[in-house]
Image: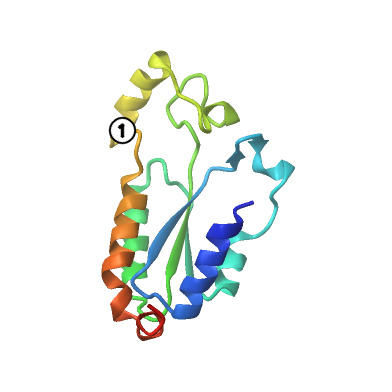
Amino acid sequence: MEGISNEACSLAGHWGLGKLIALYDDNKISIDGHTEISFTEDVNARFEALGWHVQTVKDGNTDLDSIRHAIDEAKKVTDKPSMIKVSTLIGYGSPNKADTHGVHGSPLGEQSIKPIQHCTLLKVTGCSLLAFAAMLSFIRNRASCPRMAASV
């Protein structure tokens, strides 16, 4: 489903980017509906085959301690990238769109945002700070990987 990102993950595993930690949002929803209609692979096995350290957090909506613990464990792995599969409910807190593809890529609307703000830690901002921070970290640390530094 996500070809170019898989190629980037393969390269990260090949280069042994031990400072790379990715959180994989496993919300089981695609733009067309539940992922079971087109996506049944074992994501953990795929990342392990790509040379990644893999962990799973079963409740990404409320179990923040498990997310913190998984990140701390991933920081200890220095010879390969880490993927933390975090199971979430897409649209968590939305009375009308939770666990539906209607929230994937579509605005929630005023009536759905208010209930969500009271049950989330971050306000809806419209930008992925996690993705931006990961990209900056990758750029800053690329020279610290001997295999990667030799290719740039």
Depth check, front residue: 134 or 84? 134
Q: Position of residue 115 (x, y in %)?
A: 36, 20
Q: Secondary structure at mark 1?
A: loop
In this rendering, would 49 be left or right of 118?
Answer: right
What residue is shown with label 1? 125
Q: Vertically, is 3 above or below 147?
A: above
Q: Vertically, is 37 above or below 23?
A: above
Q: Residue at x 34, y 19 (%)?
A: 114
Coloring applied to the structure:
rainbow
Q: Position of residue 81 (x, y in %)?
A: 42, 71
Quarter holding residue 133: bottom left
Q: Position of residue 32 (x, y in %)?
A: 66, 34
Q: Position of residue 128 (x, y in %)?
A: 35, 43
State how many labels appear: 1
Task: Report the quarter where the C terminus lies.
Answer: bottom left
Quarter holding residue 33: top right
Neighbours of disc 1 within 10 Å: few (<14), some (14-19), many (20+): few
Can residue 51 be seen here? The reply is: yes
Quarter holding residue 10: bottom right
Q: Vertically, is 134 above or below 99?
A: below
In this rendering, would 36 be left or right of 54?
Answer: right
Q: Farthest residue to the top: give it.
A: 111
Hey, what amino acid is under mark 1? Answer: Thr
Q: Residue at x 31, y 33 (%)?
A: 125
Q: Farthest residue to the front: give it.
A: 152
Can residue 52 be seen here? The reply is: no
Q: Residue at x 31, y 70 (%)?
A: 75
Q: Residue at x 40, y 13 (%)?
A: 111
Q: Farthest residue to the right: give it.
A: 37
